[in-house]
Amino acid sequence: MLKTAIEHFENDRYEEALPLFEKLAREGDAEAMYYLGMMYYEGWGVEKDLDKAVEWWKRANRRGSLDAKYMLQTICSTSSVFARE
C-alpha cells in the first residue's frame, strides 16, 4: 500500500494518496507520516497547515525517519513554530 501511495503522490494525485498515507500512518508507518507532513507543509491535497506538518514529522522522527528529522531541523532553523510548544 505504501508503494501505491507514493506513486500517487509522485504523480500529483494527492487526493488518492492521502487516505492511504493516513491509514498507514495510523498503523505506525514512519514513511507515511513523513509524506503526510510534506502534504500539509506544501498544501498538496490538503489545506496548508504547518502545525500538522510538524506534528507528523515529529511522529515520524520518533520512529526513526531521517527525512522527517531533516525537515524538523530545517523548519526549526527558519521558523518560530517551536517557540509555541
Image: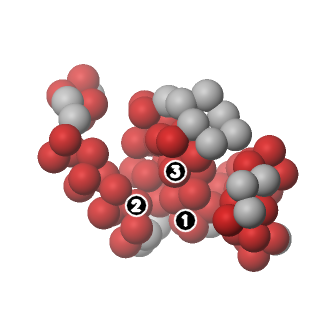
**Are there few (<14), some (14-19), or many (20+) residues within 10 Å of tag 3?**
many
| In the image, farthest residue toward the bottom | 3
Dividing the picture into quadrants, the one containing residue 80 is: top left
* Quarter of the figure with the C terminus: top left
Mark 3 and mark 1 lie on one chain; the one further toward the N terminus is 1
Marks 2/3: CA distance? Answer: 9 Å
Position of residue 3 in the picture relative to residue 53 (left or right): right
Label 3–label 1 contact, CB within 8 A = no
Considering depth in this image, is 50 or 25 the residue closer to the camera? Answer: 50
* Disc 3 element: helix
Q: Which residue is mark 2?
A: 68
Q: Tell me which amino acid carries mark 3.
A: Met
Label 1–label 2 contact, CB within 8 A = yes
Can I make out residue 24 in this image? no
Q: Choose mark 1 or mark 2, whichever is in front.
A: 2
Q: Tell me which amino acid carries mark 2.
A: Ala
Q: Which residue is mark 1?
A: 30
Position of residue 40 in the picture relative to residue 24 (left or right): left
Considering depth in this image, is 34 or 25 the residue closer to the camera? Answer: 34
Q: Is residue 71 above or below residue 4?
A: above
Q: Is residue 66 above or below residue 50?
A: below
* Disc 1 element: helix
- Please tell me the numbered disc located at residue 38: 3
Can I make out residue 49 in this image? yes
**Are there few (<14), some (14-19), or many (20+) residues within 10 Å of tag 2?**
many
